[in-house]
Amino acid sequence: MIRVRRSVPQCLASAVVSALLLLGAPGASAQAEDPPEGAGGEAGSAPAEPPAGVEEIVILGEVPVGPSLKDTESVILFDSADIQALGAQDVSDLSAYTPNVAIPAVGSTSPTFFIRGIGLSDYNANSTGAVSIYRDGVSINAPAIQLGLLYDVEQVQILRGPQGTGPFRNASGGAINVLSKKPTGEHSADLTSSFGRFDERDFQGHVEAPIVEDLLAGRLAFRFRERAGYLENGCAFEPPGGRPIKTSDSVAARRSASVCGERMDEQWVRTGQVSRLPFGLATPLNDTGTWGARGQFLLTPETELFDSQFLLNVHGSHVDELSTLGTTYGTQGNFLGGQTSRGYQEPEIAALLAADGPLRALLVAENPGLSSREITALLQQTVAKELANKLDPDPYRIDVNRTGDTLLDNAGGFLEMKFSRGNLQLTSRTGYEWYDRLRDIDQDYTPIVLFETESQDDAYQVTQDLNLNGDLLGGDLVWNLGGFFLHEELDAHILNYTAEQQVVRSGGSLPTVRNFSEKTQDVAVYGDLAWRLSDDWSIQGGARFNQEKKDFDYALFTENSPPLGRAPAEVWRAPTGMAGITYHFDDRSTLSFKYTRSWKAGHHNASANRLLGATTATPETIDAFETGLKLKLFDDRLTLDAALFFYKYRDYQILVVEHDFGSLPSLEFINASGAKVVGAEALLDLYPLKDLDPIPSYFDALHLYLTFGWLNGRFTEFADSTVQSLPISQTQVVNVLVVADYTGNRLPNAPPFTVAISADWPFEIGRFGTVTPRYDGAWSDTVYFDQTEGRGFGDRSGNIFLPKNAIGQPPHWLHNVRLAYQTPDGQFELAGWVRNLLDDTYKIYAFDASGFNNLVVNILNEPRTYGVDFTVRW
């Protein structure tokens, strides 16, 4: 170790920062995590000697513990510069620029993850998806905290494809690992302030300093972000005391009493009551309010027996924002754009369908031979197609009678200990996470109560990873042994409102109460190795044994019915593994072949109804075959990473809408018997003008990054049967068995083609610094949000009537631009940016609730935003 001679300002800064760090430093010591491969030099290369006068803290380990990057891995990386340029708040903002990855999130605490078409569309608190989420190598099981703010990040790793070995659990789709920057033992600090459209304010930064010279270092990081909403609520101007309703039973009177489209029953109108719309509803909607903070303490004691490191990570975050809402299109009358149950219709749609509207007049002029009824049918068909493909004329204006909050508190941390002697390294990582969440959501996105929820859920998890790795045969054989343990306890309490009321005390029936708790215990042991057989060939292999136990207690009751409960204890076990072979063209270019067997444990349905009870989807398995090509050519001007893969899936877990006789339609998770995926990906990293004569040298830095994804994911065997009540006359119905066959349909959230392009070009302007323009663009082919290929589940009788893309999104682009200026010393940076440059509007999620309340709900992307960033580094 080298001691540093510091100036007086440095000494003062060190004293202040050290005091701040010591106030929060526990007595226990902690350890640092391995740097990700590919960051900071070639894996396996000898560490360079530090320059004179620079303090050095060595981070142990060449072989990462947890999600790792190997010759056979298909992985895409985002560094801190990419994250800042894209303005990513969380990992869902990176999915558009990652081939074959989709992360549809309904708000900052409700994500779902899909990689190569594999995922789980469940927004319940107990949803454990098919993509494992890690933060600094610690498994994050609860979906409420899987997104989290991105700040002070070293790298985001997205591992595509099933993971059959290592510490992964339920990773039949892949894994995502967010790596934060670790203490280095040096003085450093930075602060980035961002201001943008919708009153956006975003502040993030870090401060780092040694606490005890050459022994203990600390790093504090934070991010605070606020932004007003971009949706306008047409119901936000109800006068105090409500609007009186005229004493009349005419339709005109009821409509004149409506503030924003809410409809009143005749009895309510006759009694002269005021509108039931609550006073003080919020606008704008879909705002952002969140902060996160992290403290890390790195201890590097010197001993004669072994090298050791200890890293303690303590973090917390808070979300306080209005619950995310979207837009609703009615389907009464079996056409998209009609009224919902209880008669609501968006005014923009009503204008399109008006008897004296311009669209009707145009259709009459173009079709002079059609009757009025035929014109009406043509008008409805035209409007339905327009809504499915392009949305309504003003999609960011909605009418809702509930604008409740989403509140989330999260706290946790981990202690990592590493011990190294010779070629052996032992790593222990013990983690803890806790959260408490409240959500008040108008799920029907209308000014009347069709289905709304108030929910509270909280959970804690304890994890333990233990790993021993080393090498033999002079480093030609690298081996890895480990074990993983997770214990999680979750409790959820949900009130479902389906009557015309805002809260129970306003009158009417009591809500339906849905309570559940789930205890999860997961244990896995694994081992893997990589053996360099010769200069040209190496093999990789590994195995893992998985066991997961879930105790699920469920209760559902209403005002006039007894509770319905279920408390099974399910235990699932399965072996998984991976085998691969790699041909090395040279040290950095390879061709690999890999087979992986992966598995995901069973899943309990937390949206059960009284007829079906709390059902369980059985475990799913996948056999995956993949070949990958990694090339570095033309003196590193070109880097190519390509993959071709084939998946065979059994018992795919998926959400369906059941139209069973004797009850309202219900949500249920079942198993599709079979599915397959064929796909390809290519990532091209290119410096096209580097070191080319006679091109001037300032053109060398032009950097292009292109990604391409192709997916053909389809169900090979998937039929769902229900008992439905079908009318045979005005007074009689008959119960029949109806089979919905989805065999051959495309998998949800699996667009056939995706393309992303990034280009940046730093221009040095002499002693004045550097100017860097950057462009990021992403294009997605048509994506469907359920297994019906965009046509929905139909009405209560199962009749399919929605137009194509009603539950999907046609192809669309997303364009971002950024222009940054940096001083020669890199201490100051000023950047201006525009995201969603063309202000395109598209759906990121849609759901067909025609069988429930005659409507389709849509979650939309953010409109165009723009702003500036100012960064100061010390």
Image: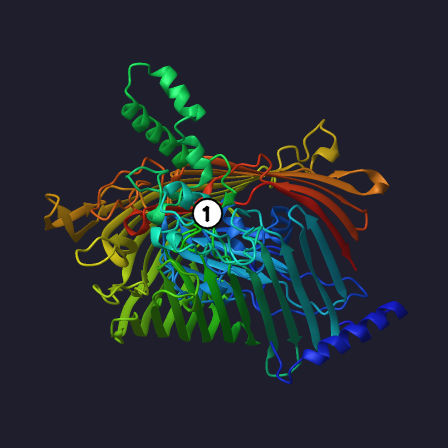
- Towards the viewer: 306 or 497: 497
Query: Where is residue 647 drawn, in percent x and y?
Result: 31, 49
Residue lying furthest right: 8
Residue lying furthest front: 247
The image shows a total of numbered marks equal to 1
Colouring of the image: rainbow
At 78% from the left and 65% from the top, the residue drawn is 54
Secondary structure at numbered mark 1: loop
Which residue is labeled 1 in the image?
Answer: 257
Left or right: residue 841 versus residue 557 is right
- Towards the viewer: 808 or 682: 808
Query: Where is residue 472 drawn, in percent x and y?
Result: 47, 68
Q: Is 93 rendered above or below residue 133? A: above
Dividing the image into 4 quarters, which one contains the C terminus? bottom right
- Towards the viewer: 570 or 13: 570
At 60% from the left and 53% from the top, the residue drawn is 79
Query: Where is residue 280 drawn, in percent x and y?
Result: 56, 58
The answer to whether residue 63 is seen in the rendering is: no
Query: Where is residue 837 drawn, in percent x and y?
Result: 60, 36
